[in-house]
């Protein structure tokens, strides 16, 4: 992020770049709970949680069908984590897809429905959180065969272009 700009300016530049109306800027600021004063502050003066919220506002600006986030709860306090959960589950409840990279196992259990565990660049397990919690332990970083993983059931909210992932056995 360009730290010399304000949060509002960052979002305005992104909206202009995407050809979106400036009204989206105010909508996103409100959605991620940045106050008007915070939105006018230079990003260099933002705390880590404020930067996280600004990043999510930027990601949501274009009204995507699929949202991909890496460690969105990083640096957030418990209230911020709860707000993040609510925001992401609300996004998913609209029939959209959320893909998260997380290392906090409790957070994964609380928020995720379907999981894919990757170790050394290979899928080592996949399924619902209930299937994976009930499954025998898998040795980390040991590749698992398609028969062991079974077919990953993707959410019906997944857009068509994502309905058959590269690891799928569907043809």
Image: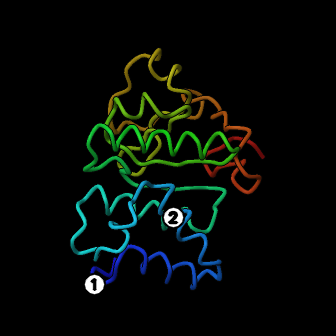
Q: In this view, does 42 lie above or below 127?
A: below
Question: Which percent across, then down, holds residue 77?
Answer: 26, 42
Question: Which percent across, then down, holds residue 54?
Answer: 40, 64
Question: Which percent across, then down, holds residue 31?
Answer: 51, 55
Query: What residue appears at the point 44 percent right and 19 percent down from the top-left corner?
Result: 133
Query: What residue appears at the point 33 percent right and 83 percent down from the top-left corner?
Result: 5
Q: In which quarter of the image is residue 35?
A: bottom left
Local crowd size for mark 1, using a 10 Å CA cut-off: few (<14), some (14–19), many (≥20): few
Tell me the residue that label 2 is attached to: 59
Q: Give left or right: position of 3 versus 30.
A: left
Q: Quadrant of residue 50?
A: bottom left
Tell me the residue that label 1 is attached to: 4
Q: How far apart are marks 1 and 2 (CA)?
A: 20 Å
Query: What residue appears at the point 35 percent right and 49 percent down from the top-left corner?
Result: 120
Quadrant (top left/top right/bottom left/bottom right) for the N terminus: bottom left
Q: Which of marks 1 and 2 is nearer the N terminus?
A: 1
Query: What residue appears at the point 39 percent right and 59 percent down from the top-left corner?
Result: 34
Question: Which percent across, then down, holds residue 139?
Answer: 33, 28
Q: Nearer the viewer, residue 169 or 10?
A: 10
Q: In this view, does 28 lie above or below 110?
A: below
Q: Which mark is on residue 91?
A: none
Q: Nearer the viewer, residue 54 or 33?
A: 33
Label 2: state its secondary structure. helix
């Amino acid at each position: 992020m360009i730290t010399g700009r304000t949060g509002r300016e960052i979002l305005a530049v992104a909206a202009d770049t995407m050809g979106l109306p400036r009204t989206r800027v105010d909508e996103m600021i409100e959605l991620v709970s940045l106050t008007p004063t915070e939105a006018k502050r230079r990003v260099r003066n933002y705390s880590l949680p404020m930067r996280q919220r600004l990043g999510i506002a930027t990601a949501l600006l274009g009204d995507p069908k699929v949202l991909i986030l890496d460690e969105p709860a990083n640096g957030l306090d418990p209230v911020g984590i709860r707000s993040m959960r609510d925001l992401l589950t609300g996004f998913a409840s609209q029939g959209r897809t959320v893909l998260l990279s997380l290392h906090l196992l409790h957070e994964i259990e609380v928020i995720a429905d379907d999981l894919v565990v990757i170790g050394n660049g290979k899928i080592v397990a996949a399924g619902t959180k209930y299937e994976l919690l009930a499954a025998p332990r898998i040795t980390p970083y040991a590749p698992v065969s398609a028969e062991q993983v079974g077919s990953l059931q993707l959410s019906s909210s997944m857009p068509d272009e994502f309905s058959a992932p590269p690891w799928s056995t569907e043809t």
